Image: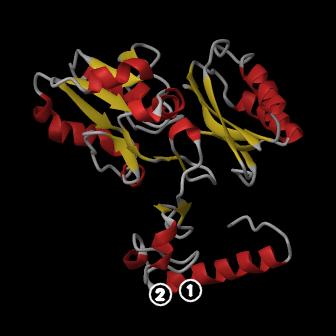
Amino acid sequence: MFTVCALYHFTRFEDPAALREGLLDLCLSEGITGSLLLAKEGINGTVAGPTPAAIDRLVAHIRTLPGCADFEYKLSTAQDQPFLRMKVRLKKEIVTMGQPDVDPKARVGHYCTPEEWNELISSDDVAVIDTRNDYEVQIGTFKDAIDPQTKTFREFPQWWEENKERFHNKRIAMFCTGGIRCEKSTNYLLGQGIDEVYHLKGGILKYLEEVPEEKSLWEGDCFVFDQRVSIGHGLAEGPHELCHACRRPILPEDKQRPEYEEGVSCHQCFHETDEDRKERFRERQKQITLARARGERHIGG
């Protein structure tokens, strides 16, 4: 059983590159895998440790970084190793919105705990907006939530500009997987003159952890960016797998559809790639299959 830690924290890092080596060395020494992003605006990532103690030591290290003494994180478990390797990357943004004036450290919307969320989003004067990508929304979202159908978070400001008139005299409630997108999206809407903006503290992950299924307004599963692919109430692993051609979630029954070919295509991406690219995918899948037969794990698998 692996311990999975999802984290983010907005703070000011004057020299993110100077922090990279220490984080990477600690993760490698503890057998931690996953991905951490460092930028001048803070840290973001999801990692998995072979023991809870390994994650505890990483958390202790992050708390020593500038402005991170009180950073929050969310823990869950996975039966199998969720990540193949460890990466610590330097980025311009820890979640890319492409809006240089957005600063979650200045102000954000009203935090709403999982216990308060149901009452808020059930109010007639509240519009609930899912800020995640379209393929994430596809497998699960909150009851009656609005799907902007964005492929990346960069598209959210344009979507808002084109749709803002729909939300006249409405309070806005937004949510995402772990909460990080809403730190930026609520700051953005406040900058657009929207006074009453709320977001789900801890994101969907915290909601599914704390709210009993019988009281939940969540419908479906929650996409996660690791080998588990999806989780449900109680953070239990969901039924979804990943199409390794397009990286979108699929259900076991989707593998019976005529468009599905392992590692090559699924019903969602079959018409998005030409035959040359499918042949490259077939060669990659062949190498993955050969690695499995040798008892090895191919990096592309």
| Quarter of the rendering containing residue 181 | top left
Could you classify mark 1 by the number of other residues whose Cα lies within 10 Å: few (under 14), some (14-19), or many (20 or more)? few
Q: Which residue is found at the position 32% from the left and 49% from the top?
A: 150
- In the displayed structure, 124 sits above or below 90; it is above
Residue type marked 2: Glu
Number of dots carrying numbers: 2
User: Where does the image place residue 40, in percent across and percent down from the top left?
Assistant: 58, 26
Instruction: Pinpoint residue 193: horizontal percent, then vertical percent.
Output: 20, 19
Residue at x 59% of width, y 43% of height: 236
The answer to whether residue 23 is visible is yes
Asked where in the image residue 186 lies, by quadrant, the reply is top left
Which residue is tagged 2?
A: 275
Query: In this rendering, is residue 287 above or below 198?
Result: below
Name the residue rendered at 57%, 77% in the picture.
262
Circle on res. 168: none
| Residue at 31 percent of width and 40 percent of height | 156
- Cβ atoms under marks 1 and 2 closer than 8 Å: yes
Pick whichever, 242 or 87, lies toward us: 242
Instruction: Name the element at disc 1.
Output: helix
Residue 286 x, y percent position in the rendering: 69, 82
In the rendered image, the vertical position of residue 245 relative to residue 204, given as above or below: below
Q: Locate residue 116 relative to residue 81 in the image: left or right.
A: left
As drawn, the residue found furthest toward the front would be 214
Q: Amino acid at mark 1?
A: Glu
Q: Nearer the viewer, residue 106 or 129?
A: 129
Q: Residue furthest right?
A: 29
Q: CA distance from mark 1 to mark 2?
A: 6 Å
Q: Please name the residue that numbered disc 1 is placed on.
A: 279
